[in-house]
Image: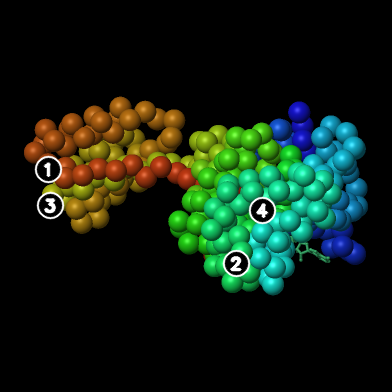
């Protein structure tokens, strides 16, 4: 099922166009990553899908047009805290559960489940405002998901979390996918998007640039791989020249004891293996070798001409 279908959506604020003919579909159980630097239009399109903003033109269809109980089927997990700091963890959850219309006999098991799933049980009587930053974010998730929605939006869910907590968030998001949920996530972290998302959309200045699976985008737009050899004593100039000629690759370079051999992704390792054997035959000692694979950061750079990290 197409859980979200966005067709030719544009948005103007006054004269300023912030979305330009954006289209994409999100299938059930997808973890859909919306990427793009500040001002790309990620929050605007998210707000339009959620019905918080109205598009200037185009269409958004949710759940293939089934309109029944729409609000109960959707959740936004905001970046800022959405709970009451003076309420305990459990009281917050009970409060949100009743606001979301859960029947009293449903509330207890749901709250229990959420506290256990998000490791909040030991803190159930602690005031939310006294939790550490990471646990406040977990409580945020719990409060947003009390009604067990099918489509969940996460806005920059891991900003400011330490690596351990980030990993925990990833696992929780994967749990949600395993439970059949559809997830839309905006993030500036490329490693996160690459590991977590089943599909990625890259936006810039209100336009959708590319959409695809992380692996597909990397092989299509990631550019070259680089093989890096560490060779004791370095490689002689004339031998570097020979490697360049044999590989028909004139960007082979040597720096101190390192030899860099770039090659197109579709090329097999065969040539590089041949070079390795040739170097060994010539008496060189290769102490180590690694391959630097292109990643999503490279995709972003190649498509937009700008880095993501500097945008944070
Ligand atoms: N209410 C508004 N009035 C006028 N312009 C707006 C309004 N809301 C957003 N914009 C503009 O729309 C553009 C897209 O903003 P949006 O918040 O969607 O970007 P974003 O991709 O979410 O960025 P970030 O990564 O910083 O969250 C920006 O140029 C922003 O200034
Ligand atoms: Mg935003």
Secondary element at image label 1 = loop
Per the image, the residue denoted by label 4 is: 142
Ligand 2 lies under 8 Å from the Cβ of mark 2: no
At x 46%, y 58%, the residue is 163
Q: Quadrant of residue 17?
A: bottom right
* Cα gap from disc 3 to disc 2, whole angstroms: 62 Å
* Cα gap from disc 1 to disc 3, whole angstroms: 8 Å
* Cα gap from disc 4 to disc 3, whole angstroms: 58 Å
Please report whichever mark, 3 or 2, sits nearer to the chain's N-terminal start.
2
Please report whichever mark, 2 or 1, sits nearer to the chain's N-terminal start.
2
**Image disc number at residue 233:** 3
Q: Position of residue 247 (x, y in %)?
A: 31, 34
Dots 2 and 1: beta carbons under 8 Å? no
Per the image, the residue denoted by label 2 is: 126
Dot in front, 4 or 2: 2
Please report whichever mark, 1 or 4, sits nearer to the chain's N-terminal start.
4
Quick one: label 3, few (<14), some, or many (20+) residues within 10 Å? few
Dots 3 and 2: beta carbons under 8 Å? no
Dot in front, 1 or 4: 4
Q: Quadrant of the N terminus?
A: top right
């Amino acid at each position: 099922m197409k859980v979200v279908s966005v067709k030719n959506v544009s948005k103007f604020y006054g004269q300023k166009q912030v979305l330009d003919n954006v289209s994409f579909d999100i299938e059930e159980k997808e973890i859909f990553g919306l990427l793009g630097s500040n001002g790309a239009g990620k929050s605007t399109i998210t707000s339009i899908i959620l019905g918080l903003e109205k598009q200037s033109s185009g269409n958004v269809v949710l759940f293939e047009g089934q309109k029944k109980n729409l609000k109960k089927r959707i959740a936004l997990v905001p970046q800022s805290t959405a709970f009451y700091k003076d309420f305990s963890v459990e009281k917050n959850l009970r409060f949100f559960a009743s606001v979301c219309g859960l029947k009293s006999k449903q509330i207890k098991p749901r709250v229990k489940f959420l506290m256990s799933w998000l490791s909040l049980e030991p803190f159930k009587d602690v005031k939310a405002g006294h939790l550490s930053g990471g646990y406040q974010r977990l409580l945020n998730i719990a409060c947003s998901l009390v009604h067990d929605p099918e489509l969940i939006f996460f806005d920059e869910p891991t900003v400011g979390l330490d690596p351990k907590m980030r990993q925990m968030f990833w696992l929780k998001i994967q749990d949600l996918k395993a439970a059949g949920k559809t997830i839309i996530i905006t993030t500036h972290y490329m490693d996160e998007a690459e590991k977590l998302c089943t599909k990625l959309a890259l936006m810039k200045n209100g336009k959708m640039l590319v959409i695809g699976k992380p692996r597909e985008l990397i092989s299509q737009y990631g550019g070259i791989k680089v093989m890096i050899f560490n060779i004791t004593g370095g490689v002689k100039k004339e031998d570097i020249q020979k490697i360049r000629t044999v590989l028909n690759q004139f960007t082979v370079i040597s720096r101190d004891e390192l030899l860099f051999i770039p090659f197109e992704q579709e090329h097999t390792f065969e040539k590089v293996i041949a070079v390795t054997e040739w170097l060994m035959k010539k008496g060189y000692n290769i102490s180590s070798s690694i391959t630097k694979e292109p990643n999503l950061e490279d995709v972003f750079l190649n498509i937009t001409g700008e880095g993501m990290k500097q945008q944070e």
